[in-house]
Amino acid sequence: MLVLLSATADNIEHVISYWVIFQAFHSPTLAGFAVISHWVPFLLFSVYAGTLADRFDCRKLIQISQGLFALASLAWAVLFLTGTLRIWHAAVILLVHGGAGVIGLPASQLIVYDMVGPERLPSAIRLNATSRYLAILLGPAVGGGLMLVLGPGLGLLTNILIYVPFTLFLLRIPYTGHRRDGGRRASGFGLVEIRRLLAEARSDPRLLMMIVLGGTTSFLVGNAFQAQMPEYAHNLGADETGTWYSVLLAGNAAGAIIGALLLESTAFIRLSARTAIACAAVWGVSMALFPAATSYPAAVALLVLAGIFNIAFTSMAQTIIQLLAPPHLRGSMVGLFNTSILGLRAGSGLTVGVLGAVIGVQWSLSLSSAAVVLVALGLLVADLRARPRPGFFA
């Protein structure tokens, strides 16, 4: 519940800030730059953050992360209230926000493993992901309500308070992220460590495939379509209050929640690298068709479908990474995977955002998603040609 509150506060900030930026500048390029500046910290520092999670108490790292999130909301609020927002302000704040995310994510992933162990890890990852997608579902509703009642500036000042409960709760839990594997680990920093991790990933094709799959979906599409969502809503006939804009964002999150419930309640989808790749391909098809929708029902339906398959392949990929990673390198390997599936989202600011300024965001998203499908099909062919592997997630 507290994780849900913190993630909701994060999404409230995104909803309010993206809407104000769109209203102030009406620039697809700026929206693309917002994606780039936000995800660059994940690209540059995820492995280092994973190494920090291997070395230090993960609770402290998450608390630092929460403090930086609150600082970003405070900065947005001051700029909105004073009417002094400039493009460079947005870039700096998004870098701070990205820094908060990159510090806290590997630490939270190790704590989840510490709590449940390998047997219940798939369910725990889906539950954690469900909380984050539920926050995406609640974020537009709460953020829109705060904008309507208080305005963007006061809404974000109120948003700071939502980070407090989870930060205080971390003072009480006994899990450090290292109790299950016998204490903290001594992995190193620097380029040598990154080369070591890549060599470790190459030793098991499933690790390498999940890293490649995450990087492909992230670089080509990522979540850049969220920053462009005001324009998609505008093209579909959005009103000035942003109601339909919130509906589109909520549709993608609702699909992810439905997908998590289906995966948790049924056993027809098997945990495997092959299944993760196939789900990513279906996600790519859904995202390619979304910009061509001519009505809100069709657009929302495609986003719901995309959400279902997005949580399917991302949760499977993350589970496979954690289960196959050597215990002493688990945090670092998670960091390498985060570099791929989150850090490379900076590229989607180019493929969807900046390219969208040239050919239109509808075409840029469709073409980028089609490229995801092609890569996924290539990985699927490579996996089918490989020798059968033992294990329940072969």
Image (cartoon, helix red, strand yellow):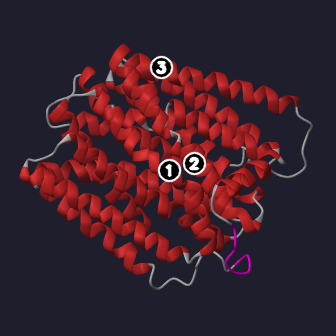
Toward the viewer: 336 or 285?
Answer: 336
Q: Seen from this angle, which residue lies furthest left?
A: 82
Q: Dot 1: what SS? A: helix
The tag earlier along the polypeptide, 3 or 1, is: 1
Toward the viewer: 387 or 188?
Answer: 188
- Tell me which residue sits at (62%, 24%) in the image: 373
The kind of residue tagged 1 is: Phe
Q: Which residue is mark 1?
A: 42
The tag earlier along the polypeptide, 3 or 2, is: 2
The kind of residue tagged 2 is: Thr
Toward the viewer: 131 or 194?
Answer: 194
Q: Seen from this angle, which residue lies furthest top?
A: 359
- Tell me which residue sits at (72%, 53%) in the image: 197
Q: Which residue is mark 3?
A: 366
In the image, residue 74 lies at what x, y percent?
21, 61
Where residue 49 sits, quadrant-wise, is bottom right
In the image, residue 52 lies at what x, y percent?
57, 68
Q: Is residue 145 above or below residue 377?
A: below
Question: Magenta region's main secondary structure?
Answer: loop
Range of residues picked out in magenta: 180-187
Q: Few, some or many C-alpha atoms within 10 Å of disc 2 (few <14, some 14-19, many ≥20)?
A: many
Q: Dot 2: what SS? A: helix
Q: Few, some or many C-alpha atoms within 10 Å of disc 3 (few <14, some 14-19, many ≥20)?
A: many
Q: Residue 23 bears which disc, if any? A: none
Q: Is residue 362 above or below residue 8?
A: above
